[in-house]
Amino acid sequence: MSKPKVYVTRRLPSPGVELLQEVCDVEINPDDSPPSRDLLTRKVRDMDGVLCLLTDRIDSDLLSSTHRLKVVSSMSVGFDHIDIESATRKGIYVTFTPGVLTEATADFTWALLMAVTRRVVEADHYLRTGKWKIQWNPTQFLGVEFSGKTLGIVGMGRIGKAIAQRSKGFKMRVIYFNRTRIDREQERLLDIEYVTLNTLLRESDFVTIHVPLSKETWHMIDEDQLKQMKRTSYLVNTSRGPVVNQTSLARALQEGWIAGAGLDVFENEPIDGSDPLTGLDNVVLTPHIASATKEARSKMAEVAAKNLISVLRGEPPQYLVNKNVLNVKPLSFVKMIE
């Protein structure tokens, strides 16, 4: 039996590619940039498997161009860049890497929250540009403390729970909104309170967002929601950019509807240098790096590779998105590796 052919859309941290190369014939896009649409379509047409990233659009047109593809393994926790319904109809397995980046993303969410509330980026720029002339000023770069304040968590999945756990050291009241309320015992252990989204926005001093992107969550935070928040509150988004209406948020920050924001994700990435957000001091902006730890990215690559290999071995992958595909094309029909 010949080795299955696999295309990897970007250079990956070890040991992802190394694991694939042990059992597959692997071709890797050598560039740091994602492959063009035409190139991706041409490559996928002749592959048994594809290991892709969030930046690679795997839609129905691309999937219809191949009759050989058996598995799409995404190195991501989100999968809205893949047409799951089309993949399932064609019997193509789709896998992803949830859980792997939970700790890194939770840490970074707090890093953003602390940076914007304590004005770290502003102060750093002030010092580096030679503006620091007075040794100590009692009214300079005043921020806010966390103790005794209310943290509102939108989305109580793995990352939301990790955020709640980290909040305990800050002696905060923690409230959350989720599509479905979590188990009461988990609420007790995390010391969190379930509320409606409107209540969360009205009562929170800090709001962090941790929901997947879907039709229901697109622009979940828009002008009406931002206007419900306290003028002294802060918003942090490390989930997906389109969950927040970026135009409305820029206006909220400019006009003082809220005090500040920390953003790692944007409606269009990379964000345009002329975007109004880039000219504001009360927002901290980072280039989609919440999961950018050596440990997390390495583990993501490893899990993505193992998911792909499992499918081609005819074994259930650890993280399967479209479980209905098992009824369309059983694993025994896609097995290529003994």
Image (spheres, rainbow, N blue to C red):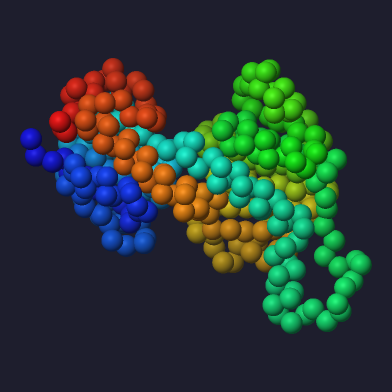
Which of the 4 quarters of the picture holds residue 311? top left
In the image shown, does 127 or 209 lie closer to the viewer?
127
Residue 241, how many percent across, how many down? 56, 47
Please give the name of the residue rendered at 74% of the width and 76% of the height, measured from the top-left corner. Answer: 127
In the rendered image, the residue lying farthest to the right is 138
**260 sits left or right of 305 in the view:** right
**16 sits left or right of 288 in the view:** left
In the image shown, does 165 or 66 lie closer to the viewer?
165
Please give the name of the residue rendered at 67% of the width and 59% of the height, measured from the top-left corner. Answer: 284
In the rendered image, the residue lying farthest to the left is 1
Residue 103, how many percent across, how many down? 56, 42
Which of the 4 quarters of the picture holds residue 211? top right
The answer to whether residue 241 is visible is: no
Please give the name of the residue rendered at 62% of the width and 59% of the height, measured from the top-left corner. Answer: 285
Which of the 4 quarters of the picture holds residue 158? top right
In the image shown, does 142 or 22 lie closer to the viewer?
22
Q: Is residue 80 above or below residue 123?
A: above
The answer to whether residue 53 is visible is: yes
Q: Is residue 255 above or below residue 148?
A: below
Q: Is residue 272 above or below residue 234?
A: below
Please give the name of the residue rendered at 28% of the width and 17% of the height, measured from the top-left corner. Answer: 327
Residue 104, how many percent across, how many down? 55, 46
Q: Is residue 271 above or below residue 96?
A: below
Image quadrant holding the N terminus, namely top left
Residue 58, how many percent across, how many down? 34, 42
Image quadrant holding the C terminus, namely top left
Image label count: 0
